[in-house]
Amino acid sequence: MAVIVPVYNSVILPQSMLYLQTESYRQVTKKEPAVGDKVILLAAKKELTPDSYSEDDFYELGVSGSIVEVNASGYVAIRTEHRVSVESLVINDDGTLSADTIIRKNETEDITPEELSKKLSGVKNALLKTVSSFQWGPAAKSWIMQWKSLGEVMGAMNQWLSLTPEEKYDLLAEDSRKARAERIEKIIYEYTATMDVTNEAKNAQEDDNQKAYREQAIRKQMEYLQKELDEMHPENVDDIRKMEKRVQESGMNEEARKEADKVLSRLKTEGANSPEYGNLYNYLDFMTSVSWKKERMRKIDIDEAEKILNEDHYGLKKVKERILQQIAVMDLNKKQSGSILLFVGAPGTGKTSIGRSIAKALHRKYVRVALGGVRDEADIRGHRRTYIGAMPGRIMDGIQKAGTSNPVMVLDEVDKLGASYNGDPASALLEVLDPEQNNTFTDHYMNVPYDLSDVLFIATANTLDSIPAPLLDRMEVIEFPGYSPSEKFQIAKRHLLPKAEKKMGIKDTQIEITDEAIRTLIESYTMEGGVRGLKKRFDTLCRAAAVEIAKGRKDKLVITEKELEKYLDMKPIRHDHVTETKKPGIVTGLAWTQAGGEILFIESLMTKGSGRTIITGQLGDVMKESVQIAISLVKSMFPEKAEMFEKNDLHIHVPEGAVKKDGPSAGITLTTAIASLVTGKAVSPEFGMTGEVSLRGNVMPIGGLPEKLMAAQRAGVKTVFIPEDNKDDLKDVAEEVKEKLNIVPVREVSDVLKAVGILK
């Protein structure tokens, strides 16, 4: 009785050979193979184990055969004979199969033996031609020559053919011998064609590789010879070879070197006449001029740094202390560390110039990046090289100009950054100023990361209002207060006048400006928190002296207070001063501007009307809200005067109507002015006040106190009311200002009204 042997994913055809592993044969038949044993090869629909057989898992056709060899190397050779149909299939308890089969006799004999022989010969010749190009070809030829039928060809080629199990079974199920032969012929020819193409591609690739290796060897030899020639005749070295040497000596990191080598290769290929040559050369020129070397942290002399800061800048005590703290931390850590500093203050207070002093104290290069008016993200990150006129961003441009990887970089006017359809440069700065990210900053023009972690960034701004919160969060704000008159006097004597003399080419013995004239310049010819306007006045005076000296009229020009108007060709600037007369409804307030502090008068008036409130003087939304709060407070504090508001129109005016005014700090002044108006009790102009008020009557803190108090002292105010919560800010106010003012901290509006005589 024949043994049933399940076979999966194999070509089983009559009159062919099939090889099975001996162990697999034992597993499915539970018998030892022996030469002469009859077997039925049954095609399985999927890969199975004996314990998972079912009748539906097998096709209805199989092939009969007999074992012709049991190989010692572990294989059983089976010679197939006829196709058989399975009449019934039984799964035995031990997992083996039993079946009733009959020989399938409906095979169509529609091809002659001569035609079969011809097809077999063609298939064998195709295979012989294919294997001849492989190393194992001779061994395969003798194997191929032994095949005596197309079935043997398919059986032997089974493992190398990309046929599905279903396609392999379809060959067995084909009743037409001619159709089966043609399908086998097609399968073998497709296989040989695929192998030929693959082999040709492989050989072509090997040829290309050999050519590339040869070319590389020749190039190396040429480079060696060219190097010797260049050393013998350096005057004949062309731009490309010079650039190649610069790239080699640049010290770039691995990623940057790969990009530079790629561009250098293109530069050589394109040639000097290519339209791309200039762009490629400019890129390499920039990459090789940027410092890739990580600078060693030098020892910092704190005493020397403090001396340099004091020599270059007068005053700014708190600012200098904070800068020295930053320098000390860097010295102890031996690396760039600490917060990004943001200097905020009025123009001319020394924010930018102190950055130069910091670079001098640290013995580093100084570079300034102007950000005012920048509206394009590419100004920070650079342009991609695909654009015409592409260039690096301002950050990397500054690094290149500094010639070092650790300069002191001042980002000037960060509050003047804008946004447009070209992106938001303020957001691009987030990566630059983040110590956790800027060690891999990628400029679009360079297209490779650059380490900015050693750069000491210092930003400057006039105000914080326009700086986005995420960017502001990256930095530590250091306020630059306005200078007091005495500080301006010392700055003028020590710095501004000597610099103006040097600039105009005159000696200090050729001009003399009296101390009274300098004080008058400060008080009457400038109106600012810084000293920029004062510097311009000294430049003007020194130019006048240069004319007199050049014409030989005078050897020395002495300028007194009376002659200022003549040489400056301008009238003194008018500052508001308190008046001697007092009138109900008019109160002196204090204001902060970018040019420093100023006083302003809040004027109020009632006229017959229907209870309207008229506000003039270009007040902003916040200040208009302060007016409404002040009116409500006065109505609640003086209920008996409520009828006045119903039968009259209240007009509130802040003089200098052409100047926009906004902010909550005029709340206390507005409340006092309206209270003075409705009670008819005048407030002395010598009382000044500043503070935001709430509907509860509380006086809340404000900003810009030092500048406001300086303005009050200059205008002749004697007593100033400030919020109780601003008491700590008095330490930032110059002693000379505090000595001349009676500063009264208050917590509630009623405290102010009592102090000025409105309430008892």
Image (tube, rainbow, N blue to C red):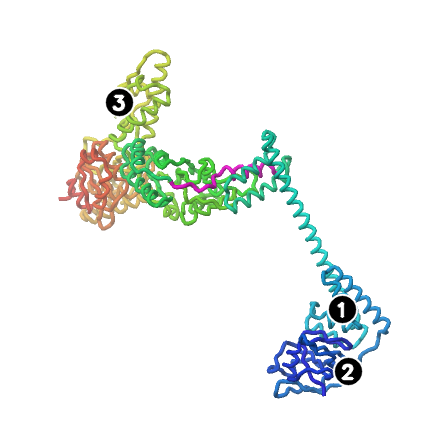
Q: Is residue 233 left or right of residue 537?
A: right
Q: Nearer the viewer, mark 1 or mark 2?
A: 1
Tag 3, which secondary structure? helix
Q: Is residue 227 above or below residue 498?
A: below
Looking at the rendered image, the disc whose residue lies closer to the viewer, 3 or 1, is: 1
| Residue 327 quadrant | top left
Say if mark 3 contacts mark 1, CB within 8 Å: no
Q: Distance between the Cα atoms at labels 3 and 2? A: 129 Å
Question: Which one is earlier in the sequence, the residue at label 3 or at label 2?
Answer: 2
Dot 2 corresponds to which residue? Answer: 104
Q: In percent of the image, x 63 and y 76: which residue is there?
A: 47
Expressed as whole percent of the image width and height from the top left, the position of residue 280 reads 58, 39
Q: Look at the image and give the residue range highlighted in magenta.
A: 276-297
Residue bearing the label numbered 3: 517
Q: Amino acid at mark 3?
A: Ala
Q: Secondary structure at mark 1?
A: helix
Indicate yes or no whether the magenta region holds residue 258.
no
Residue 737 against residue 155 in the figure, above or below: above
Instruction: Tell me the CA gap for discs 3 and 1.
Output: 116 Å
Question: Residue 195: percent from the left, percent from the top?
Answer: 72, 61
Residue in front for this viewpoint, 702 or 695: 702
Quarter containing the C terminus = top left
Query: Disc 1 residue type?
Result: Trp
Residue sitting at 19 percent across and 48 percent down? 637
Q: Quick one: label 3 or label 1, which is nearer the N terminus? A: 1
Q: Amino acid at mark 2?
A: Arg
- Which quadrant, please, contains the N terminus? bottom right
Would residue 572 be seen by someone viewing this image from the given angle? yes
Q: Which of labels 3 and 2 is toward the front? A: 2
Q: Identify residue for label 1.
A: 143
532 to the left or right of 5: left
Q: CA distance from mark 1 to mark 2?
A: 31 Å
